[in-house]
Amino acid sequence: MKGKCLCGKIEVEARDAAEVGLCHCAMCRRWSGGPMFAVHCGSDVSFSGGEPAAYRSSDWAERGFCPECGTHLFYHLLPGDDYILPAGLFQDAAFELTGEIFIDEKPAFYEFSNETRKLTGQQVFEQFAPCD
């Protein structure tokens, strides 16, 4: 898959993905202006044309954006080097909405009719917490 930021300065290339998930957490909603339409791309992601700026949003992740136009480029989980990219970067992709996370933080003013797997924030942390 190939995509680009709003101004076209930074291009991104990632392995093909067919699924998109939604994150309703307060941080993603503040960052994106609504739920984040997230495409899990793993570590095989490359950027060209310029260097994305990054903001360390937690102990385990950073968020990247184009320093020229501000387009959101990635959510990067540092421990596993996993990139989660906004679906809007890929204008020609045909995604299927398959899941929603942090459903307990979703505000009441919107609702999706798709049948999806839904996880609360606690369930997300339990699923992805490292084993001791």
Image (cartoon, rainbow, N blue to C red):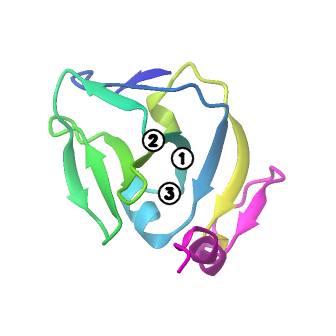
* Secondary element type, mark 2: strand
Q: Is residue 110 above or below residue 17?
A: below
The answer to the question of whether label 1 and label 2 lie on touching residues, with beta carbons closer than 8 A, is yes
Give the spatial CA distance, label 2 vs label 3. 15 Å
The earlier-in-sequence mark between 2 and 3 is 3
Task: State how far apart marks 1 and 3 are (Cα).
Answer: 12 Å
Residue 49 horizontal/vertical position (percent): 19, 21
In percent of width and height, residue 21 lies at 63, 49
Q: Which residue is mark 2?
A: 85
In the image: residue 33, left or right of residue 71? right
**N-term mark: 1 or 2:** 1
State whether residue 6 appears in this view.
no
Q: Amino acid at mark 2?
A: Leu
Please tell me the numbered disc located at residue 38. Answer: 1
Marks 1 and 2, how far apart in space?
6 Å
User: Residues in magenta?
Assistant: 104-132
Mark 2 Cα-neighbour bin, 10 Å: few <14, some 14–19, many ≥20:
many
Q: Secondary structure at mark 1?
A: strand
Q: Is residue 8 left or right of residue 27?
A: left
Give the image location of residue 90, x and y in percent. 49, 26
Using the image as rendered, state which of residue 69 and residue 122 is in the foreground: 122
Q: Which residue is mark 3?
A: 34
Residue at position x 15%, y 40% in the image = 67
Q: Is residue 47 magenta?
A: no
